[in-house]
Image (cartoon, grey):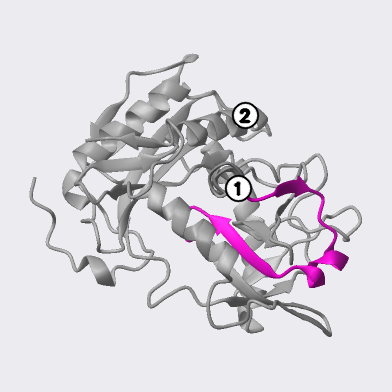
Amino acid sequence: MAKKDIDWSNLGFDYLKTDYRYVSNFKDGAWDEGEIVTDNNITMSECACVLQYAQTCFEGLKAYTTEDGRIVCFRPDLNAERMAMTAKRLEMPVFDEKRFVDAVVEVVKANEAWVPPFGSGATLYIRPYMFGINSVIGVKPASEYQFRIFTTPVGPYFKGGAKPIVITVSDFDRAAPHGTGNIKAGLNYAMSLHPIMEAHRNGFAENMYLDAATRTKVEETGGANFIFVTKDGTIVTPKSDSILPSITRRSLMTVAEDILGMKVEHREVYFDEVKDFAECGLCGTAAVISPVGKIVHGDQEIAFPSGMEEMGPTIKKLYDTLTGIQMGKIEGPEGWVKTIM
């Protein structure tokens, strides 16, 4: 199939309507068979549960073209598993995990012409999401839901190389203990919008959130997990029941330990020890790893020895290895890369 006539190398991280999307409806206690459709509009009541009580969740993953011409995606089974966990916490019906992966494959195949070519730096972003669609005025879960997947081509996250960013410690709390910080609910992202805009207005790229209970331990940013490197080369990631279990972070830890032979620790990280780390990064689907050069907390500034010019050597090795696996250049663990076509 011929590719769309797009300047792939100049795409941003924005929505661009593609030809097809997947839709399945839950009604009378069951999901229908689902279908590929062309209409990207959604019609619902003004009193739809999602509009009144934010009963919605989502996932994000990407499809890539490998060097040998295959179209693949990375660990979609973990996105399916995480959405199932989120749905249970929000009293939403679980969309079967195998059906989730099958739907991802189906919608990517349908939009083959929109999958960027190898070497362009661009990818096809895949957004599965679910929401309560029937009218609800009393505070209760919806009884009808819609599960959808759309795709959109996006450009390389780093144009001209990954330059380290400066972040700040937020005065706001991201998630309460025993709250919803460990699921991918839309409401978590809504509450992060004001803090991130405040950070941007003050000249910072992102927020570091501390734990709400004691404000002494590192949690995550509004949309990415932290990864630290000690001066002796140990990989450290914060552990908390309020942190979203990032698929990228979990994959990087496996890469570090099983492929690169590094020592890995997944534990509570106190803010007081951050100044002693050699490198810092933010990991997630969009960028894989965004290097952090400096953290500002009030009058305190923590500048990492890796500097403000480029990724630190350990984080770069992790980044290159994981992206190599995703693009088919490096053999990864069995089942990590799913061939779509």
Is residue 69 visible to the viewer in this orientation of the structure? yes
Relative placement, left or right, of 237 versus 154 is right
The mark that comes first in sequence, 2 or 1, is: 2
Provide the residue span drawn in magenta: 262-288
**Three-letter code for the amino acid on which mark 2 is drawn:** Pro
Who is closer to the viewer here, 319 or 207?
A: 319
Q: Is residue 128 located in the magenta-colored stretch of the structure?
A: no
List the single residue furthest toward the top. Answer: 29
Q: Which mark is on residue 141?
A: 2
Q: x, y percentage for residue 254?
A: 58, 42
Above or below 123: residue 110: above
Q: x, y percentage for residue 39?
A: 24, 42
Q: Residue at 69% of width from left, 57% of height from top?
A: 220
Q: x, y percentage for residue 257?
A: 61, 45
Is residue 171 visible to the viewer in this orientation of the structure? no
**Three-letter code for the amino acid on which mark 1 is drawn:** Gly
Q: Which mark is on residue 182?
A: none
**Location of mark 1 (residue):** 261
Above or below 335: residue 156: below
Q: Residue at 46% of width from left, 36% of height from top?
A: 333
